[in-house]
Image (cartoon, helix red, strand yellow):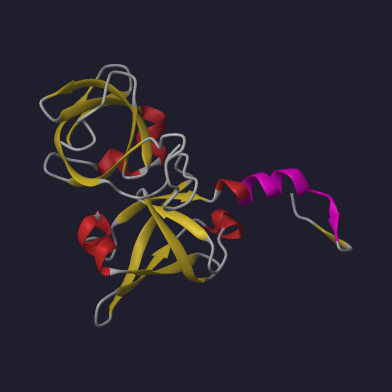
Amino acid sequence: MFTGIVEELGEVVGVTPTAEDSTLVAVRGPLVTSDARHGDSIAVNGVCLTVVDVDGGVFTADVMGETLRRSALGALGTGDRVNLERAAALGSRLGGHLVQGHVDGVGEVLAREPASRWETVRFRLPAALSRYVVEKGSITVDGVSLTVAEVGDDWFAVGLIPTTLSATTLGTRSVGDRVNLEMDVLAKYVERLLGGRPVDGAEVPA
């Protein structure tokens, strides 16, 4: 479990396809590797990966074919910057929201609107996921916990403060770039529990 508060910007230093429909990814991240051990979880652009090895500030992780197909990690290359976060510890502050590191879909940057000290960024999202997005609700974009400012049938917009722009990859994402999206897990559980039941006289869609 994560919080969506990025701890550091890492750098991909190696991408090695393997014979078993997977890829071994090596990422440099001095902070997140400072106490990392084999088997620990680190979120890379919002995808929960398991540490295979740690060596001199670089950790490696196996990325299975299913993950490569369902997220934007398949497009990673050497030199790419990535958002990194270690798994949350019990008793620590929950600075963002509950993030599982399980990507629900891939979105796309549609537009950026700079202001004096922040930016409004609009993203496309798969239409099937739009029902989980509400104004002022939480969403995770490339591992960053964000508050939804506006939402449409197949898009949503967020406001990025200076800290987010400078400390995460979202500050350099261009129009057309693909991003990992994770919906608020609470919304998915509520839908599952109420699916098909009448609520205030109306039928809840399954």
Front residue of 197/23: it is 197
Quadrant position of residue 114 = bottom left
Against 150, residue 85 (above or below) is above
Question: For the point 42% across and 52% down, which residue is it?
Answer: 95
Q: Is residue 140 left or right of residue 17?
A: right
Which image quadrant: the N terminus? top left
Report the residue at 89% width, 63% height from top: 201
Q: Nearer the viewer, residue 23 or 32?
A: 32
State whether residue 85 is above or below residue 173.
above
Residue found at x 53% / y 68%:
136
Residue that lies at the very extreme toward the bottom in this rendered image: 116
Q: Which residues are magenta?
A: 187-199
The percent coordinates of residue 203 (x first, y second) are: 83, 58
Question: 125 and 33: which one is in front?
Answer: 33
Indicate whether residue 188 is drawn in magenta: yes
Task: Tally the numbered discs.
Answer: 0
Query: What residue sits 42% from the left and 41% below the top?
Result: 92
Q: In screen coordinates, is 186 left or right of 33?
A: right
**In the rendered structure, does residue 114 fall within the stretch colored magenta?**
no
Figure quadrant of residue 118: bottom left
x, y percent for residue 64: 36, 26
Q: Is residue 187 above or below residue 47?
A: below
Residue 174 can be seen, yes or no: no
